[in-house]
Image: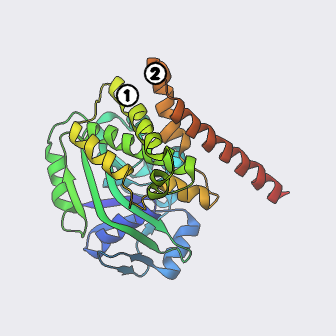
Amino acid sequence: MKILVVGAGAIGGYFGGRWLAAGADATFLVRPARAEELATSGLIIRSRRGDVSIRNPPTVLAETIRNPFDLVLLATKAYDLDGAIASLAPAIGERTAILPLINGIRHLDTLCARFGEAHVLGGECLISATLNERREIEHLIDAHRISFGELDGSMSDRVRSIEKAISGSGFDVKASTQIVLEMWEKWVFLATLAASTTLMRAPVCDIVSAPGGTDLVAGLMEECRAIVSAEGYPPRETFLERTRGMVTAADSTLAASMLRDMENRGPTEADHVIGDLLDRARAHGLPCSRLSLAYTHLKAYESRRARESLCEIR
């Protein structure tokens, strides 16, 4: 199976790197600067689950794609989706499956509109990883899993084929008949974590140790749950119990990657993770005061970042 990994950042680089280490036919679709980095320094993964070092991993630029791929793993940030779609279009053949690992839900409609629903799978990953100052991929927790499935919930032959092809690559693989529900559930978790840790500029343990901190997190989670339920995907009670424990644990150093983005003065997925939820809440007439406050905080950060970047250019 020929695999194209769109993006060689923390997520795409991690899963793509493990595929290559296991002998898979995987290629990274990257921009010229990243291609040069990989050719010079290789792809390095630092992980408690085992390090990986690959010299000069296979890369391709958008303009040099000549043949379609069997599977396209789309592992970009949500705000880069439009550019990624334009870049990967030449790789889509009659039977190509697109597996997106992008936060939120809106990207499914975008991909289906561009390539047709038959090409698009649902997907999500459970991992925490980042690029360090040496441009190595640091795997921050034990978990490293990809889940995927058909949008209609069927266990198709292609899903079974993909599961077989990518299993045994050094991370966990799950073919699911409920992937769309699982994506909505993950959105509840991610939006709760992102809203709370960016608003407070602190990890879970510091938030819940502060007066009113646990109530703030619980209130954010309830707002997210209500929105997702109104959209027709009520989260399962087992998920809610597990997630409550994760986002209110007194000893947890967990924080959203969006907080790291802010601390590094980078762009954020505020519109895709929180703004999109708020749009849906308004459509259902649901009050979301806590989520709105977190979104305002993020947009104020983005405004300041843009202004300061403009001053630096001048």
Name the residue type under label 1.
Ala
Q: Earlier in the sequence, mark 1 or mark 2?
A: 1
Quadrant location of residue 205? bottom left
Indicate the quadrant containing the C terminus: top left, top right, bottom left or bottom right.
bottom right
Q: Which residue is mark 2?
A: 286
Using the image, determine if residue 88 lies above or below residue 177: below
Residue at the farthest right position: 314
Within 10 Å of disc 2 (Cα), the crowding (few <14, some 14-19, many 20+) is some
Residue located at (23% from left, 68% from top): 169
Residue located at (18% from left, 55% from top): 163
Residue 151 lies left or right of residue 300; in this view the side is left
Element under disc 1: helix
Q: Position of residue 173 (x, y in %)?
A: 22, 58
Quadrant location of residue 300? top right
Distance between the alpha carbons at the discs numbered 1 and 2: 8 Å
- Answer whether labels 1 and 2 touch (C-beta < 8 Å): yes
Residue 206 lies left or right of residue 26; in this view the side is right
132 and 191: which is toward the camera: 191
Name the residue type under label 2.
Leu
247 and 228: which is toward the camera: 247
Q: Which mark is residue 226?
A: 1
Q: Position of residue 31 (x, y in %)?
A: 54, 62
Q: Position of residue 131 (x, y in %)?
A: 50, 68
Residue 159 lies left or right of residue 90; in this view the side is left
Indicate the quadrant containing the N terminus: top left, top right, bottom left or bottom right.
bottom left
Element under disc 2: loop
Residue located at (54% from left, 75% from top): 37
Q: Is residue 86 visible?
A: no
Using the image, determine if residue 266 lies above or below residue 238: below
